[in-house]
Structure formats: structure tokens, C-alpha cells
Amino acid sequence: MKATVADIARSCGLSTATVDRVLNNRPGASAANRQRVMEAAKQLGYLPVVDQVTLPSRPAHLEFFLPIGTNAFMMDLANHIEDYAARLPLVASCRIHKLAGISPNALQAGVENLSLKANGVGVIAIDHPRTRNILREIVEAGIRLVTLVSDVPGAPRSAYVGIDNRVAGRTAALLMGRFVGGRTGHLAMVVGSRSYRGHEEREMGFRSVLSEEFPNLTVTSAVEINDEPDISYTATMKALHNEPELLGIYCVGAGRSGVAKALL
């Protein structure tokens, strides 16, 4: 029989009202009492299970390594992570490391500032041998690792959090083909960075559907812009100049503001 709030209250020596506040994430309970309630709930099997993994009873110290730079998406993601973590009782602290770039060197420099009390790490990183070694060292130190947005499957991560990027690319191609309406012509592609597995997978999925279902459409320009709006603006202006009858542009990753500016 499943444990009740009363069972947890008896186990940790607190009132049922305090237990109810903690379990429902309401104010009015001290950090010490929250810890006692969560530990008792875990021991009694009350805590929820996600994919057969029991949620931890001790608040975790989380750190995230994000190549933010001037990337608006990364900035928004960092803000959302901090906001959400602040509302979770099982998160003791959340720290965002703003990396100088996407290179393994930038990740290595960031990881050198990893706190000794960190329990979990989230990272957006390119799929590179040096990157995989860096991530492997994090896991070997006893820290749980999660890859975000773009996966690094060769690393011993606990999970990948993000969409299926190949399906995203295929979906974009299907929409593009339908929007064009049977016309024959050229398309341009602005790619954040093929160093990201996710961006590479989106491009592959996009090209695959074009070849399968829309042979009337050809990608004549595909430029990597390193997620920089200024570079995407220049690349888009060049594509528009070289292809006056350009039918569409697929923007993979960040840099959308540069594309939009060029189309105004």
C-alpha cells in the first residue's frame, strides 16, 4: 500500500501541514524541514518515479555550460533554466557558465570552473573527440551529465534533452515544398554550424526530403554562419543577389534575425 502524507509526517516527526507544503512546493517550510520530508518520502516510496528512476531526496547543485555569445536563443534558454530551477525544491543551486564559443577549448576552459559540489551538469556542445573526452571526465568524477539541444551520443551522458533534429529538418523540407506549390527553383540554406550534430542532422533531413519528394527544388547555397546574425545577414543578401528568383531560405539554428533583416 502506498505511503500517505500522515505516514511521512510520523516518519520525519513533522506535522502533516508541513509535509503537505513541502510535497506541493508551497512556501512556509524551512530548508531543513524540506530535507527531512523529502528523505522520509523517498524511504517510504512516496516520491514519484520518472522512467523508473526515483527522484532524488537531496537538493542538487546544477551547472550548465552554454555557448551563449550573441546567440539570442542561448540567452533565452539560460534565462528559462535559471527561472525554472529557482522554483524547484530539489535544486539547491543553479549556475550558468557562459562559454566564449563552441570549440572544445572554450568548453575545457569553462569546465575548469566547475564547482566541487556540483551533482549534475547540462551542456550544449559540438560532437568532437576532445569534447567527448571532456564530458567523459565529468562523468568519471561522479557527476550526472545531460546533453541539451544537440546530442553527443558518444559521451556517457545520462540523457539527451531536445528534439529529434533529423525529423525537424524533414518537417522543414515538407513545409517548404508545400509552400512553394510545385514551382521549380532554388533554395538557400543558412546553417549555424555543422560542428553541432543537431544542425548537421537538420540539414541531412531537409536535403533527404527534397530529394525524395521535391526534386523540383535544389539547394544552391548553404553557408555556415556560426550563429552570428551579421554573418547570416551577409549570406542572405548574397544569396538574394545571386538568385533573384530564389524560392525559399531554410535557417538552421540561430541567426534568424540576420535573415529577417535581409528580407525586409
Image: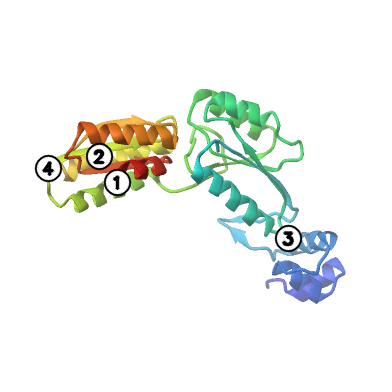
Q: In which quadrant is the N terminus drawn?
A: bottom right
Q: CA distance from mark 4 to mark 1?
A: 19 Å
In the rendered structure, which amino acid carries the disc numbered 3?
A: Lys
| Callout 2–callout 1 Cβ contact below 8 Å | yes
In the rendered structure, which amino acid carries the disc numbered 4?
A: Thr
| Callout 3–callout 2 Cβ contact below 8 Å | no
Give coordinates of residue 240: x percent, y percent: 24, 36
Label 2 Cα crowd, 10 Å radius (few <14 / some 14-19 / many 20+): some
Label 4 Cα crowd, 10 Å radius (few <14 / some 14-19 / many 20+): few
Numbered label attached to residue 208: 2
Q: CA distance from mark 3 to mark 4?
A: 61 Å
In the rendered structure, which amino acid carries the disc numbered 1?
A: Arg
Q: Earlier in the sequence, mark 2 or mark 4?
A: 4
Comparing 72 with 119, the one in front is 72
Numbered label attached to residue 184: 4
Q: Earlier in the sequence, mark 1 or mark 3?
A: 3
Label 3 Cα crowd, 10 Å radius (few <14 / some 14-19 / many 20+): some
- The residue beneath circle 1 is 170
- Secondary structure of the residue carrying tag 1 is helix
- Secondary structure of the residue carrying tag 3 is helix
- The residue beneath circle 3 is 42
Q: Earlier in the sequence, mark 4 or mark 1?
A: 1
How many numbered marks, from 0 up?
4
Name the residue: 64% across, 26% down.
109
Numbered label attached to residue 24: none
Give coordinates of residue 260: x percent, y percent: 35, 45
The image quarter in which residue 130 lies: top right
Give coordinates of residue 141: x percent, y percent: 69, 33
Q: Where is 83 relative to 24, above or below?
A: above
For marks 2 and 4, give the one nearer the viewer.
Answer: 4
| Callout 1–callout 3 Cβ contact below 8 Å | no
